[in-house]
Amino acid sequence: MTRATTVRAVLAAAVLLVSVLIALTMSPRLGLDLQGGTRMVLQAKDSDTAKADRESTDRTLEVLRQRIDSLGVTEPTLTRSGEDRIIVELPDVQDPRKAAEVIGRTAQLSFHAVQGPAAQNGDRADAKGDAEAGNGPTLPDEQGRSLDLGPARLSGAGVKDATAAFDAQQGAGWTVSLDFHKKAGRDWTRLTGEAACHPVQDDRRRVAIVLDQQIISSPQVSPSVGCNVGLPSGSTQITGSFSADEARELALLIKGGALPLPVEIVEQRTVGPTLGAAAIDASARAALIGAAATALFITIVYRLFGALAAVALAAYGLISYAALVALGVTLTLPGLAGFVLAIGMAVDANVLVFERAREEHAQHPGRSLRSSLTAGFRNAWSAVADSNVTTLIAAGLLFFLGSGPVKGFGVTLAIGVLASMFSALVIARALTDIAARSRFVSDYRGINGIAAPGRVRTWLTRRDPQLMRSPRRWLLISTALIAVAVLGIVVRGVNLGVEFTGGRLVEYSTSRPVDVERARTALADAGFADAEVTTAGAGDLSVRTGKLDNDGEHALRAALAEEGGETTKVRDELIGPSLGDELRRNALIALGIAVLVQLAYLAIRFRWTFAVASVAALVHDVIILVGAFAWLGRTVDGIFLAALLTVIGYSVNDSVVVFDRVRELWAKARRVPLATVANQAVLQTVPRTVNTGMGALFILTALAVLGGDSLADFALALLIGICVGTYSSVLTAVPAALLLERSSKAPPPARKRAPGRRSGTKTARRDPLDNGARV
């Protein structure tokens, strides 16, 4: 072996060994949509005393962390997002009502002296007006009598600890015991000492304990306490006929402290554990079957070298999985789909190399197999690099402009691209270099898969179709397709998901089958006349409404249970209207930036005419995909956005491969008409386009059929997008570039000097557009 091959083999072995160790010793971090649980996005709001900035939001996050820890949730996750948002993830929490109630309460605790019963005209609670007048609030006590309170003498910040306990000796039932800090304890003694100066049974002998502008307890100071003596400063006890749950909730609210800022739930998602487990199993089956079909396909097409590429494909799967685990990436359902999709895309680099090696071997029949393979890797490098960069751009946009699970898809897609390049350019190359040194492999053309030109290339050489003879014809077909898509958008409309419109979407599984019409009638009778009911999967029901809080969802589920028996919530998504507007706006921004970034990159790497033509094909694909979903009535949501941006990357990927070949051939034949050059470039890259597309289609078909309802729309979008993108990269981008070049006066690209060629060296002249294939 040469030194380069040895280095690649050692590097590949080292990376694989580390990957195996990581896979065996570390577990993946599953997102809530895979393990089940609730995810909330809280929006901090400005208060009278604080502004919702980064610092105050961080303080709010810490208070929430203490509250959630007190709830006993296993491994909760709280992170700040931006200036004023907090993301809360609660594994295994299926009923978010209690968590939302505890999380959302401001828990402003205060202790007041009672001035006496309220005047007759002051029976209503008017805390804000009294506060502005310099007085305490007027609030109803536990029995409903209105009391005039003095200004707050002590706040919840003075409470050191709060515990709920059952007081069996005094017969008080469940109580909450408070321990004060030192200074607050002295204030408590002073407050109770002043109250003790009033006669027994006088309201002024009471101390009001107020939580969020509501008197939760107003006990009388014991007759044994002397005037201005007060209760001991260490602790006190709140009584109020609490249940066990109420006492514990009150204790954790007081212990956690008051929220520095009020918070509003702008997004809430709940996924049942069975749905997550089913999604994992379905994706695993899709990955195994799709990968096996892809490996079998490339083995049939490229024989021994295809089998070695399949081995590299398995190594890719191991490396990318280990990278996800080692980096602590949260694996979400779209991320899992991205991981599976990248398996199909990982074949692309190997296909590019093998097709270039076939061309080299056909052009130079006397060249050794190893030399042809080396030339294939060298000549395919620019197309591999450019196509993977465009995919990385799409993945980066998904990460920076997406939200929630879409970010996970962007991360897994980026890791998959990098791992696929390593597997193709290091592992596959090391394996094929070693195999190419074998005389047996070199001598038998039917075994190595490189010495024969392939059926697609042979058929094209025989027929030599002139696809670019009339470029306007293809553009008219593309225009007609766009018109059909736009008609679907106008006539049928785009079915935006709850994520973009705001509202609530809940999926239920019932023990008895329920007809959709019966479910609609039951919900209408229960007061949910505006609820949209559809089927979701095998017997499940999907209910979509506008504004619906957690108590309303509980009532809605109870109404369905009357018809369907035991009703289990499978999935729950709540998006506030402000967040829906923001996500919709960000989606449009993401698409706009994707188009501009791809345009800038292609203009730098190629010519402006090629860049504009590629972006025109890209826009063509986006419109057709959205129009197809409009005609089919499918939901356009964040997952669709992830698929759309992936299609953009894939479409540009294909265009890059074709234009890279156009640039190469045109530089060699500057006087040949561009239409002839482009036609030859298209014919030379068709085998790669067909074989790569087949690899991706195997994976996506497996996802669509086996991936379950949660991945069906995602796989369908990618199936449509890849088919349309494959067409447009050849029959839209290239004809558009030809028409643009006719109006452009820019000279053809300069020819690059072949590697290793010296000045003065004479070589045999040949037709630069001859692909060398012979039949």
Image (cartoon, helix red, strand yellow):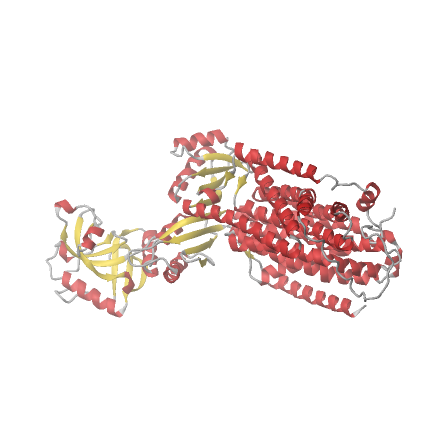
Picture quarter with the N terminus = bottom right
544 to the left or right of 351 = left
**Residue 708 makes an appearance in the image:** no
Residue 403, given in percent of the width and then of the height, sits at 50, 52
308 to the left or right of 518 = right
* Quadrant of the image occupied by residue 86: bottom left
Q: Is residue 611 above or below residue 712?
A: below
User: 501 or 585: nearer the eye?
Assistant: 585
Residue 770, given in percent of the width and then of the height, sits at 83, 50
List the single residue furthest toward the left.
Answer: 199
Residue 341, given in percent of the width and then of the height, sits at 64, 50
User: 202 or 633: nearer the eye?
Assistant: 633
Residue 662, given in percent of the width and then of the height, sits at 73, 51
Q: Is residue 319 above or below residue 533?
A: below
List the single residue furthest toward the front.
Answer: 745
324 to the left or right of 657 = left
* Residue plotted at (48% across, 34% down): 533
User: 129 or 571: nearer the eye?
Assistant: 129
